[in-house]
Amino acid sequence: MISKEQFITDLKELLETDSDITLDTDLLEINEWGSLSAVEFLVMIEDRYGIKAEPFSVAEAVFVEDLYNIVSKA
């Protein structure tokens, strides 16, 4: 399983941001997060972690922790 720290590092790299992101961060507070980055997130977790997730689960995510849970439960 991917560590929380590595997950956040990978997410920040995907979003190309240096913003302070934690598991408690609301996705709406991340300026770089949007529908395109949600699709890129799906691609990233499949490429890096070998995980296929349902697009609706990503669309329903509110916090970074929700995204992490998608990865950790797979």
Image (cartoon, grey):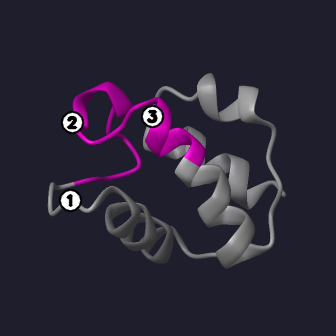
Membership of 26 in magenta stretch: yes
- Residue at (31, 25) in percent of width and height: 28
Q: Give, as a three-letter code, the residue at label 2.
A: Asn
| Dot label at residue 31 | 2
- SS at mark 3? loop
> Does residue 6 sit above or below 41 in this rendering?
below
Image-quadrant location for residue 67: top right
- Position of the C terminus, as image quadrant, is bottom right
Give the mark nearer the N terminus: 3 vs 2.
2
Q: Quickly name the residue at label 3.
A: 63
Asked if 60 appears above or below 66 in the picture, the reply is above
Q: Are marks 2 and 1 in contact (CB under 8 Å)?
A: yes
Range shown magenta: 21-39
Crowd class of label 3 (few under 14; some 14 to 19; many from 20; radius 10 Å): some
Identified by mark 3, the residue type is Phe
Q: Position of residue 54 (x, y in %)?
A: 81, 38
